[in-house]
Amino acid sequence: MRTFRREVLTAILVKFGETGSFYMFAVFLVSYATTTLGYSRATTLTAIAVGAFVATVMIPLCGLLSDRVGRRKVFLAGSAGLIAFSGPYFWLLSQRSTFCILVASVVAIGLIWPLVTATLSTLLAEMFQPQVRYSGISFGYQIGAALVGGTAPLVGTLLLAADHGRWRWIACYIASISLVSFIAVIRGVAAPGVAAERSAVGAA
């Protein structure tokens, strides 16, 4: 924490969009869709499961894509997708249609989220020198997940109540934490420690 404070903070922020959005799409959705929108529990869980199944196919494909075009570009594309789709996602849910909740889950969980989750771990690994890499990743990953992942269903419930059952503030929350991750990658992934390590390897 003394020597790699910047990298650890960046790792925490990079984790925000990936974990916060998933907990909204896969955990908060269950209570929101069934109690507020009137979907059956079976329909809601099926939509999430279909989205997750698509994600299992897309994650390795996104990893392959990142090997070709760069992990940073793929992660940023996914973060931008989460920002752009946060409003349409809840609009689709509000149609109270089985087809719409299925489309919303497939696009959010199955198509957009894999772009960030497939590249997150490697991005974090590249931020730290080998001698601190395991601890550095663990700090960033676990603290980030606890701050916005574990609290996401509670935050969603509070925002829903504060806006009298409307979803707009929840969509803004997902967009905001995704924007934080987007900016963190733009400004912080090329960490000084890694840059120095690469320079040393290149000189050798």
Image (cartoon, rainbow, N blue to C red):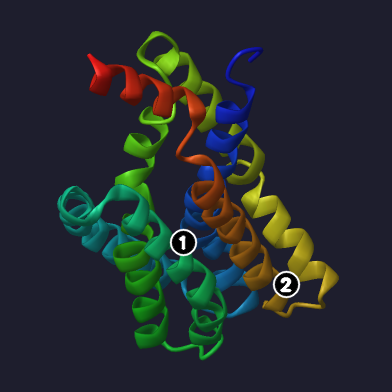
Image quarter in which the N terminus is found: top right
**SS for callout 2:** helix
In this view, 134 is above or below 127: above
**In front here: 125 or 108?**
125
**Amino acid type at mark 2:** Trp
Identify the residue at image location x=62%, y=32%: 9
**In front here: 26 or 120?**
120
- CB under 8 Å between discs 1 and 2: no
**Furthest residue to the top?**
131
In this view, 38 is above or below 20: below
Label 1, label 2: how many angstroms apart (C-alpha)? 18 Å
Identify the residue at image location x=15%, y=53%: 68
Question: Where does the image place residue 111, in percent across and percent down from the top left?
Answer: 30, 67
**Furthest residue to the front?**
203
Q: Which mark is residue 79?
A: 1
**Amino acid type at mark 1:** Ser
Mark 1 vs mark 2: which is more N-terminal?
A: 1
Taking the image as shown, residue 71 lies to the left or right of residue 60, namely: right
Image quarter in which the C terminus is found: top left
Q: Residues within 10 Å of mark 2 (few under 14, many from 20)?
A: some
* Quarter of the rendering containing residue 61: bottom left
**In front here: 14 or 57?**
14
In this view, 172 is above or below 24: below
Q: Label 2: which residue?
A: 169
Question: Where does the image place residue 23, in percent across and percent down from the top left?
Answer: 52, 52
Question: Where does the image place residue 12, in percent across and percent down from the top left?
Answer: 58, 36
Question: Where does the image place residue 166, in percent across and percent down from the top left?
Answer: 72, 80
Identify the residue at image location x=75%, y=77%: 165
Taking the image as shown, residue 68 lies to the left or right of residue 185, namely: left
* Quarter of the rendering containing residue 134: top left
Identify the residue at image location x=72%, y=55%: 155
